[in-house]
Image: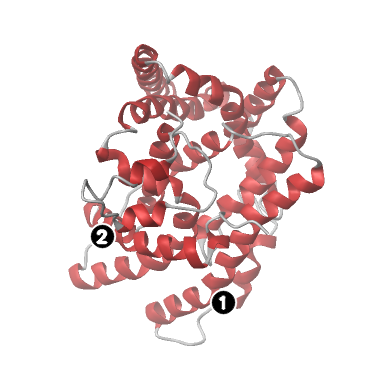
Amino acid sequence: MGKCLSDNFLAIGGGNGEVSALALASASVGSKPRYGSVDVLKGLAILLVVWSHTDCIGSELWKCGTFGNIAFFFLSGFFFKVNAPFGEFMSRRVWRLLLPFFLFYVLSIPFRYVTDLWDYRSFTVFDWSRIWDIFKVEAEHDYLSLNVPLWFLFTIFWIQLFGFFVMRLPKWCVLVVGLAALFFGPDILDWPTAVMFNNACYWFGFFAVGYVVGRPLLKVLSDYRWRLITLVFGLVVCVGLVCFLESNGANGYFRILVGMAYLAADVALLAVGSFIEDLRVSRWLLFYGESSLFILGAHLFVLNPLARISYKVTRIYDPWLGLACVVLTALILVPVIGYAKRRWPMLTSDWRP
């Protein structure tokens, strides 16, 4: 636990001193120690999110994306701190969240224009008003048609701004606020707001739970026996909640249990990550977890063309075909991430002014 990922990747090339492209791409200047179990879960979550953005999944597999989103907001709360003046706090969030959001958003304009040209064979079909999606006043505002996944960056910016004030309360108060956000989530999402404010109010619940339980949970997972107990506990709670919801539905007072089931699954997978974080088999998940911000913003630039080519060749939509596109996308992004870290670190959140 708590190793620097760069230490893990230096050994990827084997004992002959070679360093793979994966190792080079993972290195970043001034990198801080990271928890391997967290990055394993982040790596799995980002790949599931990418899979959910293919055209090949049904309503059931769409839950993979929901799981990924919940995992990211939950994990984002683990290391959140309010230990700087407001000006410095905001400056860090602008550089690490809003700047990547803006750059990816601008890059998405020509990409979406070309995509529409590919789909409709017309230079006039592109709707320029979609550039202003971020300012639309609407309910459940989590869709940016230029680059759908970028909603996460803007939402987490708002959430951390909320956290600057809320996390000054005692942790039990933070937990109450978070659980209230989860319980009233469907009602909150029905409020029409601009700039994804309603979205942030709902997802703040998962962030707050992560803030309260994250560090104690990682401490528990440092002990082998407690890892096993945590794994079993998470699985039992998740399966129990799913069975209960299948029998009773997720309406009324029970709707908060949906989020709790996802969180229990996250806890179980964190325990799994703590078992495998030092194994070679986990190095890809560690890498993708560390690079999740860049993958979030850039994966559609690779995935969309691959998905269109696969459909043109096969004329079918199939989850396994979508998964193949995800694997190819992930592999293609390895050297791209390495280049971005060296040349465009502001797209990877590694850059500091």
- Tell me the crowding category of disc 2: few under 14, some 14 to 19, or many 20 or more residues within 10 angstroms, Cα based: some
What type is the residue that disc 1 sits on?
Answer: Asp
Tag of residue 317: 2
Q: Nearer the viewer, residue 117 or 275?
A: 275
Q: How are the residues colored?
A: secondary structure
Q: Nearer the viewer, residue 64 or 275?
A: 275
Q: How much space separates mark 2 and mark 1, taking CA atoms?
A: 26 Å
Question: Does 102 sit left or right of 294 as displayed?
Answer: right
**x and y, in percent, of residue 58 in the image:** 33, 49
Q: Is residue 46 above or below residue 338?
A: above
Q: Total marks drawn?
A: 2
What type is the residue that disc 2 sits on?
Answer: Tyr
Does any portion of residue 225 appear in the rendered image? yes
Q: Is residue 280 above or below residue 221?
A: below
**x and y, in percent, of residue 301 in the image:** 42, 67
Tag of residue 135: none
Task: Locate the C terminus and report the quarter of the image it occupies.
Answer: bottom right
At horizontal 44% and vertical 56% (from top left) the residue drawn is: 295
- Toward the bottom, the furthest residue is 123
Residue annotated with mark 1:
127
Does any portion of residue 63 appear in the rendered image? no
- Picture quadrant of residue 208: top right
At horizontal 39% and vertical 49% (from top left) the residue drawn is: 288
Q: Is residue 17 above or below residue 308?
A: above
